[in-house]
Structures are given as structure tokens and as C-alpha cells.
Amino acid sequence: MSTHFVDLSVTAAIASLAHRPFKQSQMDQHPCAFQHQTNINPAAPAMTIPSIPNLIVQLILSISVALLLSALFPIQWICAMLPLGRARSTWRSMSILILLSAAGVAVFLHINSTEGPNHYEDWLVSLVFLAASIFVVTVCTLALHTAKDLSKIAALEFAAIVDPVTELFNRRHIMALLDAQCQLSSDHNSPFSILLIDIDNFKTINDTFGHRAGDIVLKELGRVIAHIIPDSRYIGRYGGEEFLIILPQSASSEAWAVAELLRAAVQSTTVTYEGRPINSPTISIGIATAFGWKETSEDLIEIADEALYSAKATGRNRICHAFESSGRPLGSRFTVVSATQ
């Protein structure tokens, strides 16, 4: 019976040990056994896989950087279209700011990729960056298209007022300038003069060398005239081989001096066509000077045209000046004075 009692005591002791909790002291005494049971290796590095939301944030930031960099291309086109000045410098400064912004977004992308997932405030920042990048690209693209449209409009306006051969103002525009000058003279009782110029024997040049040679002569004489006259805003091709020059605030003496400079400069000009020299062209000039002009621009042109006719009738390569005092009948408005070279 005593033996049976001992067996029961041993059985009870084993059962109590089986239900007793595992203490920390026991884990300290048997660390290897504990690590083996839990299959934990403290030397192995922890592997972190970014969550899908964080990858989307990084993708949005990468797209923002790409959009900001793509905005530099329309800015380069705009700078190439603009002349040197403040506007071009401003656009170049804008490109530097865009580069700095792209660098800032790239830094934020690097920080986001190293901090790990679950930074929900990064969603808001990344979306703000994306919206700002789209705005910058849109503004730069619209600015480029606007610059191109303005360039086309300017080209059309230029073609509407400029003669394609001489690159001087055409008849319509130079007559509009003359109308404005007549009105200014009438309002302020101020003097001004006009020079009506005709190329001597131009038909002979066309018949001998052809119309292409005639265009070259027109272009070369237009260049000479523009070089002599200080303000090219008042020079135009009146028609055919005739040029019209407006000299604001110029009385008869100033107009005569300018006309003589033009006549001498043209006479000393040599024009060649396909290696063949063209006879040195000459010009005849009719001058009309008005003080406080009260009538139309066509009336003043008529006076200068009659003076030009007198210059050609007296031998060409000459200057004739019509002295004007407003208010007299048309038939007695001017006195023609001729001058040879």
C-alpha cells in the first residue's frame, strides 16, 4: 500500500509541473532551447517590403519630377523666339526655379523611400506636387503656343505693311503715315517735307537685264536710302520704281540737304547681276515742303510729283524743290528750282 501511495504522489507532481507557467528565469537558464523552440534567429536581417500605397506615392512623386523637367522644353523654345531683353531673362529665371522645384521633389521622394510606408500625410504632399507640376507644364505649353500665334500674327502684320522686294513700307502704310503727318502739321502749324524719288531709266534696266535684275536694283537702292535716312519709319516704296520719304520737322533747307546726300550716294552705288555690272543707277527727286498743311496728303503728293517731273524733264539725276505756302490755289502753289549733280 505504501508503494501505491508513492506512485500517486509522483503522478500528481508531474501533473502540476505540466500546468505551471514558463517563467523568465527558466528562459534565461535555457536560451538555446527557447530559441530552438520558437525558430527565431536574431542574426538574420529583417526584410521590409514597401506597401502598395507607398509605392503609389513614390510613383506620383516620380511623375511630378518628370513633368517639371518636361516644362523646360517649351521654355527653351520661348527663349529662342524672344529677342534679348527683360522678357527673355525672366523666362530663363523661370527655368532655374523649375529645376530647383524638381530637385526639391526628388529630395522628398528620397526621404519617402527611406522612411517606409504608412505615412499618410505623404499622400497629400505628393498630390499637391503633382497638381503643381501639371499646372507648370500647362502654363509653359500655353505660353509657347501663344508665342507662336503672336509670331504668326506679327509676320502677317509685317507682310501687310512692308514691300517684299525692298523691305520698306508699302504704299498703303507710307500714305497712312503721311496722312498722320499732315494732320500733325495742321494742328501744330509745323513744317515738314516729302521726297518723291524715281529711278532714272529703270525700264531700260528691266529690258536689258530682266525683271529680276530690276528687283535687285530696287532692293539695293532701298538699302542705300535706309542707310542715309536716320529714321526708317518714314521710308516707303510708293509704287513701281518710286520711293516716298517723309521728313518731319524739316524745312526746305534740311530737305534739300538730305536729297543731295541721297542723289550722290545712289550715283556712286554699283549694282551687279549674275556677275555683270549694271550701269550705275541714278535718281531724280521732287521735294515738297509744307507749313501748317490744311489739305490732303494726295494734294501734297501731286506737288512733289510735278517737281519730280520737272527734275526728269531737265536731264534726270537732278533735284527739284516745290516751295509751299498753304492757302494758295493749286496752280500757283510751288516754284520749281532745279539742281544738277
Image: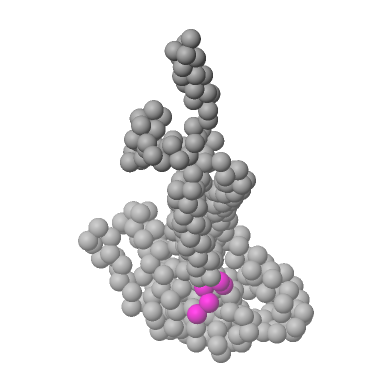
Residue closest to the far front: 1
Q: Quadrant of residue 186?
A: bottom right
- Residue interval drawn in magenta: 230-237
Q: Which one is in front, 14 or 134? A: 14
Task: Please give the name of the residue rendered at 76% of the width and 76% of the height, measured from the top-left corner.
Answer: 294
| Residue 206 against residue 249 in the figure, above or below | above
Residue 136, x across and y down, in percent: 56, 51
Task: Please give the name of the residue rendered at 40% of the width and 63% of the height, measured from the top-left corner.
Answer: 219
Q: Which one is in front, 215 or 50? A: 50
Q: Quadrant of residue 127?
A: top right
Residue 111, x across and y down, in percent: 47, 52
Q: Is residue 50 magenta?
A: no
Residue 33, x across and y down, in percent: 36, 32
Q: Say whether residue 294 is left or right of residue 103.
A: right
Give the quadrant of the C terminus: bottom left
Task: Work out whether residue 69 can be spotted.
Answer: no
Q: Say whether residue 181 is left or right of residue 16.
A: right
Q: Which one is in front, 224 or 102? A: 102
Task: Work out whether residue 2 can be spotted.
Answer: yes
Residue closest to the far bottom: 253
